[in-house]
Image: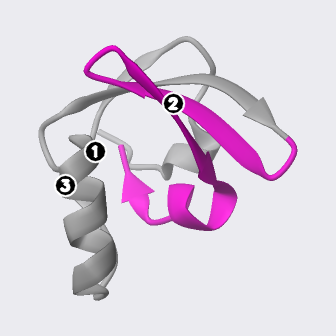
Amino acid sequence: MVKMTLKEALEGKEYTINKIETEDEELNAFLFSLGCYSGEKITVISHIGKNLIVSIKNIKYSIDNKLAEQILV
């Protein structure tokens, strides 16, 4: 299985989060509070400029490309 970042993910396709690549504990805690952690399903709704609209547990969030590059699917 080829791992890629969420930034590279296709719109409308559901992915499983494999890993969050950050050493920032505060960021890890924030992502965990959104339901964004290894094993969870995530869908990219759209790429808009430097942001992505994603769906985690049927809730939509806007995240920037820098953060999306740290989420491996």
Using the rendered view, name the quadrant where residue 31 is placed. Answer: bottom left
Say which amino acid is labelled 2.
Val
Q: Residues within 10 Å of mark 1 (few under 14, many from 20)?
A: some
Using the rendered view, name the quadrant where residue 23 is placed. Answer: bottom left
Say which amino acid is labelled 1.
Leu
Look at the picture and state if 24 lies above or below 60.
below
Quadrant showing the C terminus: top left
**Residue identified by numbered label 3:** 32
- Foreground of the two, 1 or 46: 46
- The residues bearing labels 1 and 2 have C-alpha atoms spaced at a distance of 11 Å
Residue bounds of the magenta highlight: 49-73
- Name the residue located 53 percent from the left edge and 63 percent from the top edge: 67
- Name the residue located 87 percent from the left edge and 44 percent from the top edge: 49
> Does the magenta-highlighted stretch encompass residue 57?
yes
Residue 18 in view in this figure: no
Please say if the residues under marks 1 and 3 sit with CB atoms less than 8 Å apart. yes
**Residue identified by numbered label 2:** 54
Say which amino acid is labelled 3.
Phe
Q: Residues within 10 Å of mark 2 (few under 14, many from 20)?
A: many
- Whichever of labels 2 and 3 marks the residue nearer the N terminus, that label is 3
Q: Residue 16, position in %: x, y?
A: 26, 32
**Residue identified by numbered label 1:** 34
- The residues bearing labels 1 and 3 have C-alpha atoms spaced at a distance of 5 Å
Quadrant showing the N terminus: top left
- Name the residue located 37 percent from the left edge and 53 percent from the top edge: 72
Q: Kindly state the secondary structure of the residue where label 2 is placed.
A: strand
Q: Residues within 10 Å of mark 3 (few under 14, many from 20)?
A: few
Q: Residue 37, position in %: x, y?
A: 19, 50
Q: What mark, if any, has residue 44 been given in the picture?
A: none
> Does the magenta-highlighted stretch encompass residue 4?
no
